[in-house]
Image: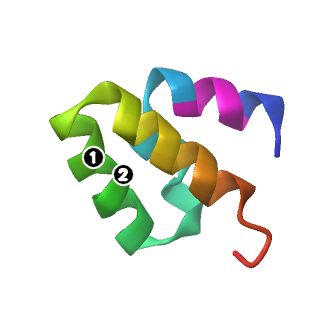
């Protein structure tokens, strides 16, 4: 995980996962709209996933 991606995930989670696919961006965006903390947690989990 890149430090810039982590900082971007904290500031604006959907932008941090833009390279991981459309579904990830939509999920993180919806979670960010529901609450900032769930969006950040989801973005960090997606960024930490070694399979993608």
Would you name the residue on which mark 2 appears?
Answer: 28
Find residue 2 and report its horizontal and vertical position in percent.
82, 39
Residue at the spot of label 1? 31
State the residue at coordinates (66%, 53%).
Answer: 47
Please tell me which residue is depicted at 24% across the width and 31% down the height of the picture.
Answer: 35
> What is the CA distance from the residue labelled 1 to the residue labelled 2?
5 Å
Compared with 18, 37 (above or below) is: above
Q: Is residue 35 shown above or below 22?
A: above
Q: Residue 51 location in percent, x, y?
A: 75, 78
- Furthest toward the left, the residue is 34
Q: How is the image coloured?
A: rainbow
Q: Which quarter of the picture shows residue 48?
A: bottom right
In this view, the residue farthest toward the bottom is 51
Most common secondary structure along the magenta stretch:
helix
In contact (CB < 8 Å): disc 1 and disc 2: yes
Left-right relation of 31 to 15? left
Residue 6 quadrant: top right
Q: Where 22 sits versus 12, above or below?
A: below
| Left or right side of 43 for 24 | left
Mark 1: which secondary structure?
Answer: helix
Q: Is residue 34 magenta?
A: no
In the rendered image, residue 49, in percent from the top left (x then y), is placed at: 71, 65
**Residue drawn 28% across and 38% down?**
32
* Residue 45 image position (x, y, % from top left): 60, 53
What residue is drawn where x is 69% and y is 75%?
52
Neighbourhood count class around disc 2 (C-alpha, 10 Å): few under 14, some 14–19, many 20 upward: many
The tag on residue 15 is none
Nearer to me, 18 or 34: 34
Q: Which residues are magenta?
A: 5-9
Mark 2 lies on a secondary structure that is helix
């Amino acid at each position: 995980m890149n430090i810039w991606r982590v900082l971007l995930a904290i500031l604006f989670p959907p932008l941090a996962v833009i390279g991981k696919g459309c579904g990830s961006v939509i999920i993180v965006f919806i979670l960010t709209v529901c609450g900032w903390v769930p969006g950040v947690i989801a973005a960090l989990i997606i960024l930490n996933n070694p399979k993608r």
